[in-house]
Image: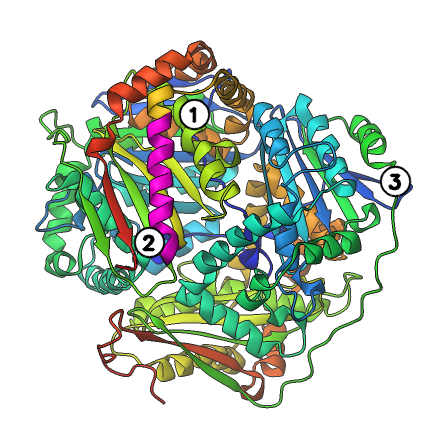
Amino acid sequence: MNFLKIVFLFCLMPIFAQADIGVKEITLKNGMRVLVKEDHRSPVAVSMVWYRAGSLDEINGKTGVAHVLEHMMFKGTKTTKPGEYSEIVAAAGGRENAFTGADYTAYFQRLEKSKLPISMKMEADRMQNLVITEEEFKKEINVVMEERRWRTDDKPKAQVNELFNSLIFRAHPYGRPIVGWMNDLENMTYEDAIEWYKMWYSPSNAILVVAGDVDTKEVFAKARKYFGKISAYQIAKRKPQFEPKQNGSRRAILKAPGKLPYIQMGYPAPTLGKDGIKNKKEVFALEVLVGILSGTSSSRLNQNLVRKTSRAIDVGAGYSMLSRGGQSTFEMYATPSEKVSVVDLEKYLKLELKNIIDNGVTDIELNRVITSVVAGEVYQKDSVFGAVMQIGQLETMGYSHKIADVYIDNIKKVTSKDIQGVIKKYFHDDALTIVTLDPQPLDKNKIPKGSPHAR
Amino acid sequence: MLVKTILITILIFFSNFSSATLNIQHWESNNGARIYFVENHDLPIVDINVDFRAGSVKDTKQKSGVASLTNHVMVLGAGGINEEDLANQFIDLGAQLNSSFDQDKSGFSLRTLSEKKIEAIDLLTLVLHKPNFDSKIIEREKKRYVASISQSETMPGAIASKAFMKALYGEHPYALPNSGEVETIKKISKKDLHDFYKSNYLSNELSIVIVGDISRKDAEDLGHKISLGFSENKMASATPLVDYKKGQEIKISHPSKQAHLYYGAPIIKRGDPDFLTLYLGNYILGGGGFVSRLTQEIREDRGLAYSVYSYFMPFIQEGPFQIGLQTKKNQVGEAKELVKKTVSTFIKNGPTPKELRQAKDYMIGSFPLRLDSNKKILEYVSMMAFYKYPLDYLETFTNKIDKITAEEIKSAFQRRVDMNKFSTVIVGSEQ
């Protein structure tokens, strides 16, 4: 039902929508980096510890272990009981949580500013003294399996996305679900979680980011006090992993209970080099292209396929120029209207790309993307949490947070010709991956009505 | 690939509260609109939110969905400007227009750079005063509604939620799905939207909240400009009273992996004197995420669910007290019994002294987090404005919380939360 509420929602490139003003940084002796950004509008502080470890670093048979360890990080240390830190943070009026991505795992607390040391002390403790018992693991792995059922197994579009990733990435670990395959969760042991912790949770593989109404020098001093003494260990050398070139389109059908068909299609796409320079021209052209196709309600896909022609009831496009794993995808999604087949809808989506190759994009469209990015940068200053997210993501993925400073300049340089160039280079049929959702009746005895998915 | 695939360990907080020394200015327009203003020049941003008492509670069973469709179509063209041009005019200003909708209210919010505020406010005013209600667009959006509703009728969570509200509210309009039903949406005409707009978008049912980089004088002009476009009708119908139903037990089969359990009853409305006491108590029972009893029992001790929660959602009339969880099908019976046991124990004995102290520490200590951005201030003050909370509500909040005793929580739960009246909905049960 989400599309019902999206009006002129303008959420272009939130990760970048804030120029860096005054981020200060030190590196502790054990290799842990600490970045601080002061913002004195409100008496609060946000603190996050980012680990450069995510599903990208997992191996077959143990998928999901990065996320399982995230759950186990709340289960006690040598001196605290399971859940005790959650109690301490809550009693300090703080909010905490954690998340796991393909590229990283992060833990955060939002607190009234004087309570910041609580968070640092706790993160330092669980970085070195985590206790994972078989008993706690056995309970928590059930929670994670429930999470997988809830997040993926009972959500048809999530299943399509899982299948899509596993098709477009056949060698690269981005092909595996972050939450893990159910089989791997069922066979995971507490020793697997311990192994993961001992492999990646060295301070030399972690970054602390703090923002808010804090004094930078004080934060540095506290960071030295709490994290500085933790001994680092050697992180295993990471092998470069690249997806072999795709030669021929890949198609799949996914059947799940539901009413509406749906397609997710996409192409492998480049990412910005860690130096902030490699692929720059292409990735910024792709960023602007996403804005022109689906940044707003009057962007091309919605305007042409939903509003003018009623061929689709819902459309979108997505791309991320950043990635630790060096691979990205450019994707489009759509739900067809009742009388439109998914085969035709695929054609209409491709026609939108072809139309740009033939006729380019207008200066008005380019300017709209720039206007929204410039405004978005101002709006993002309203969120301290957003600043911490941006710095942490960039740094954990291997970029400098300073590349945010030149984001708008690079967006402004993109021309119609640049956009035509990337479409021609990357979006051809032999590089296409497409997954179609074939909705099934809830009652298995009924025969599916019509055949919107037929080819 | 990045943000959209992040897994977030869910904690459900219904942060209905907040406070601080926030200077809220308040006045009324000549025709009864309530205007609230928080001046802040730290950032060159102006945020505006307007809410009308025009949510789905104003729908009828026959034309369920009119209220939502009106809210939705209002932003799709106004003042003779077509939908594409209107959207582009906002975009060219760098301004963001969003609409919101729930049982009680229909809302519109504008975020703009202060240097573009005059033009952006003009556009917002046009949307509010002169929606086009274009027939072609209405027909197109009706089809999208129908598709989306029929899709949601196959999703276990949406099925459960709809059945739960039906079980709690019966013939009361709170039972109507926010976006209507397939059959009722099909019957809605342009005239229906127009009539709904005329009779429900009234100045005396309107609250306007302005936050940010704008002067008092300009805020006054803005408030008057918006409110004067609406007529006043003091005879507007009040929200119907809730007639308590007997609890029901509803089971709906579904081929999902998990069963969805909803459990609760209508309990409390906005402005009820027991609200803070119940709210604080519920933090301990099931509102406080990892530190709540329900999460401890269901998730931490037994691994039965990823998310389990309880909350009071007060409306103008009695809103639901709701407990929810999802679990593997063959565990739902066990989970249900545990929920019942946990709730009944809490009602019987109330919180322990330690729990109460921790809950107060959290409520009072987390106070600054609730108002740490203009956006949060806007949302918070909008809630206060719409539901006519007293202006000193935020100032007195921590003090009131601090004074609540364990005995008061126990007494409030015993007086107000009657499990015999609870309904249970399970979608995807094995039976």
As helix, strand or loop, the secondary structure at mark 2 comes to: helix
Residue B205 position in % (x across, y down): 21, 29
Residue A87 sits in quarter: top right
Residue A357 position in % (x across, y down): 53, 81
Q: Is residue B229 above or below residue B185?
A: above
| Amino acid type at mark 1 | Phe
| Residue pointed to by mark 3 | A28
In screen coordinates, is B365 left or right of B193?
A: right
B30, B360: nearer the viewer: B360
Residue B237 position in % (x across, y down): 10, 30
Query: Distance between the Cα atoms at labels 1 and 2?
Result: 27 Å
In screen coordinates, is B5 left or right of A76?
A: left
For image coordinates 42% across by 69% down, the residue present is A301
For image coordinates 25% across by 19% down, the residue present is B415
Mark linked to residue B17: 1
Residue B294 sits in quarter: top left
In screen coordinates, is B24 left or right of A54?
A: left
As helix, strand or loop, the secondary structure at mark 1 comes to: loop
For image coordinates 63% across by 69% down, the residue present is A174
From this viewpoint, is residue A16 visible? Answer: no
| Residue pointed to by mark 2 | B157
